[in-house]
Structure formats: C-alpha cells, structure tokens
Image: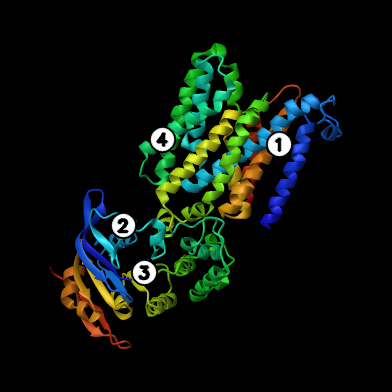
Amino acid sequence: MNLRTHQLTAGYGTTAVLKDIALTLPAGKITALLGPNGCGKSTLLKCFSRLLTPQSGQIWLDDQPMSAFSTRQLSRRLSLLPQHHLIPEGITVRELVAYGRSPWLPLWGRLSKKDHQIVEAAMERTHTHALASSHVTQLSGGQRQRAFLAMMLAQETPVVLLDEPTTWLDINHQVELMGLMQALRDGGKTVITVLHDLNQASRYCDNLVVLANGSIAARGKPEDVMTPALLREVFSVEAEIHPEPVSGKPMCIIKDGKAKK
Amino acid sequence: MNARIFIGLLLMLLLMSALALRAGALPLPWSALFSGWQSTSEHHYILTQYRLPRVILAIAVGAALAVAGVLVQGTVRNPLASPDILGINHAASLAAVGGMLLIPGLSVFWLPFLAFTGGMAALLLLKLLANTASPMKLALTGVALSACWASMLDYLLLSRPQDINNALLWLTGSLWGRDGSFVMLAVPALMVLLPLSLRYCRDLDLLALGDERASTLGVSVAKTQWQVLLLAVALTSVGVAVCGPIGFISLVVPHIIRRCCGGRHRILLPLSALAGALVLLLADMLARTINPPMELPAGVLTAIIGAPGFIWLLVRMR
C-alpha cells in the first residue's frame, strides 16, 4: 500500500506546521522522515495515522482517500508506534501484545488460536518472550519499547508508522530494530519512520524525506539526499559525506565549527 | 486465580445476604430464612417487606456504583477518578433534593428521574466546557463543577431549615426505609445498564493505552468516551436516587480489584460489581445492627470501614 498526500496543510489551532505537502511514499519500501526539531515530521506522521485532521488537502491510501475509512477499517491497514507510551496498570506483556489484535477481534475480544500464534510470533521477533508474564509497569524503558513494538507487529497492517522508534533502545536493540524494519519491508509492508540519526537512516532506509519549516527540502535515495549542501541548509552544519565502510551508503561526518548561513 | 476470586466473592455475597436477612433491630432465627417466605409465618412481613428489598437494593446499588467507578476511571484514565469528581453525584443530589424541597409531597417514584436529569445536565455542561479536552482537563473541570453543585446544595438546605430532615437523611446515603417500590424502579434499570457496560470491555482496555494508541487500534475514541460516561451517569443516578450519594464505593472498589486482579475490563467489571455489592451490603447490615433500633447511614459506614482498609492496602502494596 502506498501513501500519497495532495496539497496537505496541517497544524494545531490556526497555525500551519505543514504547508502544501505533495508526497508519495512508495509501497514496500522503508521511508525515513528527517529534519530538525519542529520541522513537522511528527505532525506528518499524525496526519498519516489520522490523529490530526488536515486543515486542507487530502491523504490517499492507495487509491482511496483516508477520510473514507472508519477508525476500525483504518486500524486494519495502518499501525503506529508513537513516541510516548501510557503504561497501563495490571497488564502483562502478553496481554499488551494481544491488544494489537484488537482491530481484528469481535466486540468481546476473544482471541482465536491463530491470534495466539500471531501474538507469540510477535514476542519472538522482538525478544520479549522471556518477559511475557511480567507486568508492563515493571519493565525498563527499552523493554517497554520492544513490548509496544511487538504489539504493533501483532496488528499485522500493510502500512507501519514509527515515531522515533530507537528512543530508549540500546545499540544492539537499535540494530535489531533496523533489521526488523527491513524484514517487514521484505514481507511487503510499507514502513515509514521518523529518525534522528542521519547515518542510521542513510544506511538502513530506502527512501529519505527531509522536512524543513513545514516543507519538503529533499527526497529520494540516500545517495541523492545526503549532500553537504543539504546538511548546511537544513541542519546548519558543515559536514563531509563519505561512503560508509560496511554498506557503502553515504555517511555524514560533521566538521568542527558551525556553518555560516 | 481470577475465577477463584470470582467464586469466592459470590459465595461471600450469598453468605452476607443470608446474614443481612437475619440481622436487624429484630434478629430473626436462622429457620426463618427457610420458613419465613410463607405468608403464614410470623416473620413473613419483616422478611419480605423490610429485609429483602434492602438486601436486593444494597446488592444492585453497590454493583452499580462500583461499575460506574470502573467506567469513569477507564475513560478519564485516572485511578483517583470516580463519578464524584465529575460532579455527577452532587448534581444528581442537587436535582433530587431540589425536587424534594421545592415540590412538597413529591412521590419517590420521581427521584431517579430527577437524579438522572441532574446527573445528565452536569455531564452535558462538563462536556460543553471541556469539549475536546484531555482527560485531565475533563477531571479538573469536573472537580470545579462538583464544588459548585455542592455549595448550591448547601444553600438549598440552609435556606429551608424547616423541611430538610428527609433530605439530610437521604444525603448521608442510607437504605433506611427503602421498600419494594424502590426495587421495582432500580432493579430493572440496572438489569439493563450493568450488562451493557460489558459491551465496552475491549474499548476500555485500549483506552488505557492513551487516546492515540486506542485510535490506531480501531477505537472511535470520542464516541466511546461519551457513551461510557453516559452509561456511568445513568448507573450513578439510579444509585444516588435509591440511597443518596455514596461516593466511596465508586472510588475504592475498582481500585482494589485492579490491584488484585489486573486491568482487563472483562475481569475488572464483573469482579468490581460483586465487590461493590458486598461492600454496600456489609455497610448496610452494620448500619442496622451496631446500635439498634437506631440506624446509622450506610454511606457513613462505607467510608469508616473502607478508608482504613484502602489506606492499608496502598501502604502494603507500595
């Protein structure tokens, strides 16, 4: 499934954070949304997950406008890992992951055998299996992040949105998460993630979208987007771009001193 | 584990009902619980006209108040929330007391409707003032409104000192003198409302994860919150109409059950209903037996028994 925006303007109250965005996020690829704080990347993600209604313009999911779906229909197509989690009291990790099945369950919420299998598999993939019977309130930040990730996997949607998913995670789990995103893509899913680390985005993502001041500053493959000129313009840093020794993808190295605009 | 707690509560409730049927200003012999139902028995009148309606009402209202507490805590996402802090209890009381004082000779039949109208008006006003707001703002606005209703109630009482006795008695939360007509009124309403709450199990579970999370998991957040609060108002109003504002059960019982049995609403709702019934039944029984023939209000007793128990639980658990 691909996501497409047409003349999208969105924000909070009367101020527009995103202005007139026209963007197509390709199906079956990993797209990273990049940009300095306040550039509108989280707002864009909120529009995609319909938590924020655009002030004008439209978002399309394949060839259907997003507004045509009911909340439940949308929840079967699109899942979100937000930046912050509310930690529910008295819920085990297994129960939390099972919540991911909700869009597919009847009102009473009883899990079928297949649902249970999906829940177990999701915990397996995120290495939360050993925590299955612990309460979510007892977990560390990184463990919680992985538990919520497992819940999202259990939702089994063709489009997956992640808002700074590496927050809280140790380096080994960050690498695992990148691998997991690639596995999801290889399984045919459309992955869209907000990332802070440019080099991580360049190495693991297929498609980069750089936002600045609510507009698109650059988009395309890492090789085309990661340039000294863009880093100077968007992030105000002087940087050199070198091929990264392992993957050969472009990597930025910041030079001393701040760029003069 | 949870099944065992359920059965345990159910058995305790049965036992307590038997004790409550027996106990009172005039204690009945055990045998009366079996033979007293025939109209020829000397205990027939007390048992069927006096004790049984109270036991039924205590169970039904206790369950309703506890379930209303679960519903409000689930939507406001604050374990300290209860219909109380949304101002529902006080508004319902205000409407009912207003009716009692301003329309002399009003039949008790109208009390639930008055209470419900008051509760609904409070909810609508709250919704108007804190419309698209976060649960936190909803709760804060509710507290402010609640204080407002409470002071209007005080004013009403103080300005008509000659006929406040009935109103005061009702306001302390008592099951004294509640007879069959209350049962006919409250029980059918609660038979509909209590099962209806189970419809929201899944959605309430997901709301605990936050509005954004619940929404991306398929819950129509605003609609669900509205419907659940409406249901809570209805349950509270029936409870308030029957035995006055007993706020403590809605606050404490769901909290204790959540601590013991987890946060899944399909467990939380039925267990809270049972526990709420048990608490009010016990409070009412003690109210009748501590110092007969004088009656203490059950509302006072729920707080006297409940508060230390609740504090003990909090201290022990942390």
Q: In which quarter of the image is residue A235?
A: bottom left
Q: Are marks 4 and 2 in contact (CB under 8 Å)?
A: no
Give the residue at x 84% y 35%.
B34
Q: From this viewpoint, is residue A258 visible? A: no
Q: How crowded is mark 2: few (under 14 residues within 10 Å), some or many (20 or more)?
A: some
Tell which tag, 2 or 3, sits nearer the viewer: 2
Query: Which chain letter goes with mark 2?
Result: A
Q: Quadrant of residue B59?
A: top right
Q: How crowded is mark 4: few (under 14 residues within 10 Å), some or many (20 or more)?
A: some
Tell which tag, 1 or 3, sits nearer the viewer: 3
Query: On residue B282, which mark appears?
Result: 1
Q: Are marks 1 and 4 in contact (CB under 8 Å)?
A: no
**Number of numbered discs present?**
4
Provide the residue designation for mark 3.
A159
Q: Label 2 sits on what residue type?
A: Ser
Provide the residue designation for mark 2.
A67
Q: Are marks 4 and 3 in contact (CB under 8 Å)?
A: no
Q: In which quarter of the image is residue A51?
A: bottom left
Q: Distance between the Cα atoms at labels 2 and 3?
A: 16 Å
Q: Is mark 1 on a helix, strand or loop?
A: helix
Q: In which quarter of the image is the N terminus of chain A?
A: bottom left
On the picture, is A208 further left or further right than B165? left
Q: Distance between the Cα atoms at labels 1 and 3?
A: 54 Å
Q: Label 4 sits on what residue type?
A: Leu
Q: Distance between the Cα atoms at labels 4 and 3?
A: 38 Å
